[in-house]
């Protein structure tokens, strides 16, 4: 199966990045492992989960606080928004906050599904930086892009799949479409073009998406990417609240807030541009 083939291929890279072996983990509680490499590799906290097992590696001087916050947590508790809150208890004093969980997806030549669409245009990294508005294409890591594929409407960039280097073997895709241009198949078109280009370079396609981003997860699966593992990290800044889940379970499905307005979390401040 594609997932087993890709996991076996990527496991050495991940274990080198993580500093611990996933194969030796217990299945009940997720251990917190102090690791000197987290001082240099970044991020200072990295949690990886696979098949109900997980591990958290952390820089040694933060380990006591993280162990106190996460001690005894099961896989399901840690890899949730609750886990992000608990990681943040230990990291906020250092100016960082927990983020995740997010899915890590991959594809190779055997699993990737192409799309026959002539609209995407190849762009260099410099071209992306000169024409892509980071406020619109904010998932496209504009500053890191080595290239990508875009669709234009009347000379304006309306959809973009950019490509960044994740490792020697992995190139990651980030996509966005202008808000008034969604649901026109452009995201799949540019992502498919970017994925094909990555495979032509002899690399694997890499894709990360938060658990609440249903459209992104569906698109990645439509392109043949498979779930390799899940991650949580510590990132700079105040605590990042995820949005409500994006997308709908089915076209035309009625969706309503479960909680009344008065029960919403009114401590959440608007996003700073």
Image (tube, grey):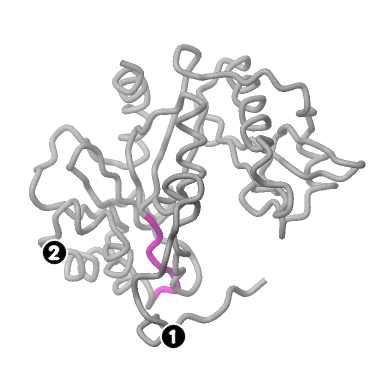
Picture layout, residue 131 above or below residue 203: below
State the residue at coordinates (76%, 35%).
150
Mark 2, residues whose alpha carbon is within 10 Å: few (<14), some, or many (≥20)?
A: some
Q: Which residue is mark 1?
A: 266
- Please state which of residues 138 and 165 is positioned toward the viewer in this rendering: 138
Picture layout, residue 66 above or below residue 154: below
Picture layout, residue 52 above or below residue 178: above
Image position of 35 (left or right of 152): left
Badge 1 element:
loop
Which numbered disc flags the more N-terminal residue, 1 or 2? 2
State the residue at coordinates (49%, 28%).
222
Q: Which residues are magenta?
A: 94-100
Residue 134, quarter of picture: bottom right
The N terminus, quarter of image = top left
- What's the mark number on residue 109? none
Residue 250 point in image, percent of width and height: 45, 45
The alpha-carbon separation of the residues under discs 1 and 2 comes to 29 Å
The C terminus, quarter of image = bottom right
Q: Which residue is mark 2?
A: 71
In the rendered image, residue 108 lying in the magenta stretch gets the answer: no
State the residue at coordinates (46%, 68%).
240
Picture layout, residue 138 above or below residue 200: below
Residue 123, quarter of picture: top right
Residue 208 point in image, percent of width and height: 47, 42
- Please state which of residues 92 and 107 is positioned toward the viewer in this rendering: 107
Residue 145 point in image, percent of width and height: 68, 40
Residue 12, quarter of picture: top left
């Amino acid at each position: 199966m594609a997932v087993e083939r890709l996991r076996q291929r990527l496991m050495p890279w991940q274990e080198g990045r993580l500093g611990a072996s996933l194969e030796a983990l217990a299945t009940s509680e997720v251990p917190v492992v102090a690791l000197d490499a987290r001082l240099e590799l970044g991020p200072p906290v990295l949690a990886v989960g696979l098949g109900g097992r997980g591990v958290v590696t952390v820089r040694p001087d933060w380990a006591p606080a993280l162990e106190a916050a996460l001690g005894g947590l099961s896989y399901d508790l840690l890899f949730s928004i609750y886990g992000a809150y608990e990681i943040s208890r230990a990291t906020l004093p250092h100016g960082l906050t927990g983020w995740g969980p997010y899915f890590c997806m991959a594809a190779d030549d055997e699993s990737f599904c192409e799309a026959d669409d002539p609209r995407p245009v190849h762009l260099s990294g410099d071209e992306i930086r000169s024409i892509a508005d980071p406020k619109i294409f904010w998932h496209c890591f504009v500053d890191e892009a080595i290239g990508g594929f875009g669709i234009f409407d009347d000379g304006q960039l309306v959809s973009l799949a950019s490509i960044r280097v994740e490792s020697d073997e992995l190139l990651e895709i980030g996509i966005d479409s202008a808000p008034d241009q969604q649901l026109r198949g452009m995201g799949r078109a540019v992502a498919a073009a970017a994925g094909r280009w990555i495979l032509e370079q002899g690399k694997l396609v890499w894709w990360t998406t938060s658990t609440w981003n249903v459209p992104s997860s569906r698109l990645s699966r439509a392109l043949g990417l498979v779930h390799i593992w899940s991650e949580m990290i510590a990132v700079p800044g105040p605590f990042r609240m995820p949005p409500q889940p994006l997308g709908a379970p089915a076209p035309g499905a009625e969706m309503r807030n479960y909680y009344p307005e008065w029960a919403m979390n009114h401590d959440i401040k608007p996003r700073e541009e």
